[in-house]
Image (tube, coloured by chain):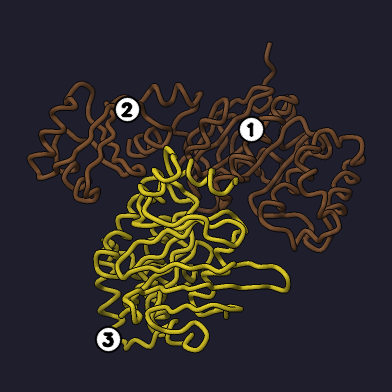
Chain colours: A brown, B yellow
Amino acid sequence: MINTAVSIKNVKKTYGEVEALHNINVDVSEGELFGFIGPDGAGKTSLFRILVTLLLPTEGAASIFDMDVVKDFKKLRRILGYMPGRFSLYQDLTVEENLNFFATTFGTTIKENYYLIESIYKQIEPFKKRRAGALSGGMKQKLALSCALIHKPRLLVLDEPTTGVDAVSRSEFWDMLGNLKKMGITVVVSTPYMDEAGLCDRVALIQKGRLLSVDTPQNIMNGYDEDLWAVRSKNIYKLIEDLRQLEEVSSAFPFGEYVHVSTPPDRINQKMIENLLEKKGHDTVEVKKIGATIEDCFMKLMKN
Amino acid sequence: MAGENGYIVDVKELTKKFGNFIANDRLTFNVSPGEIFGFLGANGAGKTTAIKILCGLSSPTSGEATIAGYNVYRETEKIKQNIGYMSQQFSLYEDLTVYENFRFYGGIYGLSRKVIRKRTEELLHELNMEKVKNRVIHSLPLGWKQKLAFSVAIIHQPKLIFLDEPTSGVDPITRRQFWEMIYKTAQDGITVFITTHYMDEAEYCGRVSIMAEGKIKAIGSPNDLKSQYDAHNMNDLFIKLVRN
């Protein structure tokens, strides 16, 4: 039997007139790597702050390993690791002093749980006498993760750890999360990068305080309910305009070097799209049927 | 207007050192008027240092660079008048209205009240946002703010606009609408110099450069670079170039 790590029931959060979270319901199982995927302003940070007992929900309830985030906040804080979106370590303490501070606060030592952070901390250990404020972005991120882990939390909550981080460091960071999962730590992470959804066991797509979908990335992609085509021609911007004028087309959006074109199921085939575009003066047209990415699904759900 | 040899950005052997640390190591590249140029690189690769020099905010240690024909050592004030700049971190004054922001930035660039009014109308009309003219910025959704910040950055009709991670964090539809604005701007003749961590956006650039450890590792059109390095897509290319 798999235990529930996080249970969120009808959680609502309002700030004055603004409704940041609208009736959120999600369960995360123990040992899962669970992602909240959505843009800025979706409500990810509000939800995470509620989970880590730093913010009260306006309505509803949330519990972590059966402990209530409001009533049992003191007990919960001992088993939670939290890495906020903004760098929140002590800038004027050194790398080592920061880590030691967090270990001591939780009544443990660096030595005791070193095995958990070893692969991450090793990369910044040569700079352990440097003040945290003087570290590069990537190093700060590794230190923050080490500090969030040093008390061996059962649940690790990471708020946009990869925002503004380059593609190489992002992929390294996800490798680290995969390793933590293997060590049995439940990980809840948020990101605005849709392509990172595929690295999670399950994801919740979130937009304007509402969940659009909660499932495995594969199920979400399989659930795309229209035909999808990748189309390419020389003049990509004329191509988009022309595609949007076709009555068979529900949407046309650039995706890298292709345009993704969504059409109602079985309404049109490859040859027909090619012919329609050739009539509009596109000569070297390439059309292929494709499966949806998470970003295609997100955009479709946003419009509904 | 471009420099002597027709380039709006013309950089030769540009080097910037901080003590012993070489942040920019002999950068050489150029950008033609109306191009969309993607300035990509790893964190800490030296992009921000280079952009500060190109905007006239910092002086190089050695090497040459001109922006719109103006020298980055001696003519920094001229450079500032001829460029626009937008970043995700600093964009608009949250407690001013949309119009007050346009008026403020227009004033900074020395535009007359009449011109500011006319440009604001044009730009808001293009965004289809005339209705929000008197709304306070903080009451608007992020995607709208991003588009407004972009318009404010071109109120003085610069020759070149620097966009520093302009789409960071916005939703996928707004991100694409933003790129449509970029395309339109480039077609109107404004050169676009952009940084991004979204590798699909690298495909939308006419040419890109990829920096790592202070050096430009590769430069060219996305298609040429992908075939040259045998990469499936820009993400793949980026990882190949930055890891090695």
Q: Quick one: label 1, few (<14), some, or many (20+) residues within 10 Å? A: many
Give the chain letter at badge 2: A
Q: Which of A270/B89 is in front?
A: A270
In-front residue for pair A196/A216: A196
Q: Residues within 10 Å of mark 3 (few under 14, many from 20)?
A: few
Task: Please identify the residue farthest to the left as the structure is shown.
Answer: A279
Q: Which is closer to the viewer, label 3 or label 2?
A: 2
Chain of the residue displaying label 1: A
Q: What x and y, as percent, mark residue B7?
A: 35, 74
What residue lies at 30% left-to-right and 43% top-to-bottom?
A253
x and y percentages locating residue A222 in the rendered image: 39, 22
The residue that disc 2 covers is A290
Residue assigned mark 1: A61
Q: Nearer the viewer, mark 2 or mark 1?
A: 2
CA–CA distance between discs 2 and 1?
A: 41 Å
Horizontally, is B186 left or right of A9 in the view?
left
Q: Tell me whether marks 1 and 3 sit on the same chain.
A: no
The image quarter containing residue A232 is top left
Helix, strand or loop status at disc 2: loop
| Residue at (61, 78) in percent of width and height | B61
Q: The residue tagged with tag 3: helix, strand or loop?
A: helix
Marks 3 & 2, CB-CB < 8 Å contact: no
Q: Which residue is mark 3?
A: B114
Amino acid on which disc 2 is placed:
Ile
Residue A63 in sight: no
Residue drawn at (53%, 37%), measured in percent from left and top? Answer: A196
